[in-house]
Image (spheres, grey):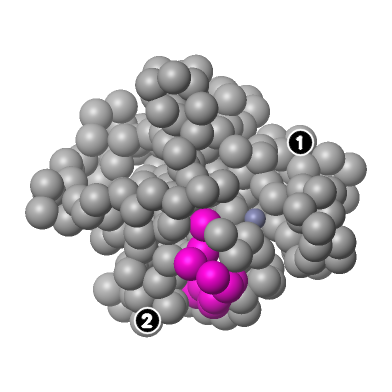
Amino acid sequence: MAEAVATVEIPGYGNGFVSAGKGQTIRLTDIAGHQVADLWAFNAEDSDEYLGAAITRMLTGRMFPELGGAFMSTRDRPILTWTKDTSPGHHDMLFASCCDRLYARRGHAGHPNCRDNYFAAAVRAGIGRAHIPDPVNIFQNTPPRPDGSFFYGVAMSDAGDHVEFRAEIDCIVIVTACSSESINAGRSTPLRLETFGARGGRRAGQPSSSFRTRPRASRTAARRTPQRPMSP
Ligand SMILES: [Zn+2]
């Protein structure tokens, strides 16, 4: 792919955001491996419209969209289409972001956390909403078990693994490098957020309706690696 239009380096325990025009590609890269990224997307013109995790689950009939499918906004339309995944494919859209009280309960008062990081980035991005939407937790390996409880696994992404999305409207994408030591293999490490392509306009050969309900490509079984169990 051509050179990035914008690049934002997000340190471990940190946050960042990019503005992406409709049709641009957003790439999120795990730099060192085993790092969860909490992600939010807002309409750049009106932050009352944002990526709705529950709405996406309802409209896709899944706990997480298939590759090639869309994340839906609070106005029931695609905001991001998931176009690429080089990771083993473990992602979550059931967990809220980690927060100060969660760590305080575990005896780590004042620990960095995704909720504070989200608000810090949202202020810089000009998003003044008082509440944090539920995030999309890229690379998070915490699937539900058959009995309804959650499995807490370390993120299985390797260094350099990345996901890509196509912006379906002009949007602002906020990302935090999750601060949890347990699900991030001991410490929070950097992420890179980039945009590619021209703003606006369709690419040649792309259908006018870019919302796909069927996957563009299926993951290969060879990339699947065993989950690594651990205690919460
Ligand atoms: Zn977190």
- Tag 1 residue: 48
- Residue range (magenta): 183-196
User: Which residue is more in the foreground, 45 or 105?
Assistant: 105
The verdict on label 1 being within 8 Å of ligand 1 is: no
Whether residue 125 is in magenta: the answer is no
Label 2 sits on a secondary structure element that is loop
Near mark 1 (Cα within 10 A), the count class, few <14, some 14-19 or many ≥20, is: some
Left or right of 44 on screen, residue 182: left
Q: Residue at x 54, y 77 (%)?
A: 190
Q: Residue at x 68, y 72 (%)?
A: 14
Q: Position of residue 166 (x, y in %)?
A: 41, 51
Q: Position of residue 76 (x, y in %)?
A: 56, 23
Question: In this orientation, does residue 166 appear?
Answer: no
Q: Residue at x 67, y 71 (%)?
A: 13
- Tag 2 residue: 3
- Where residue 108 is drawn, which disc sits there? none
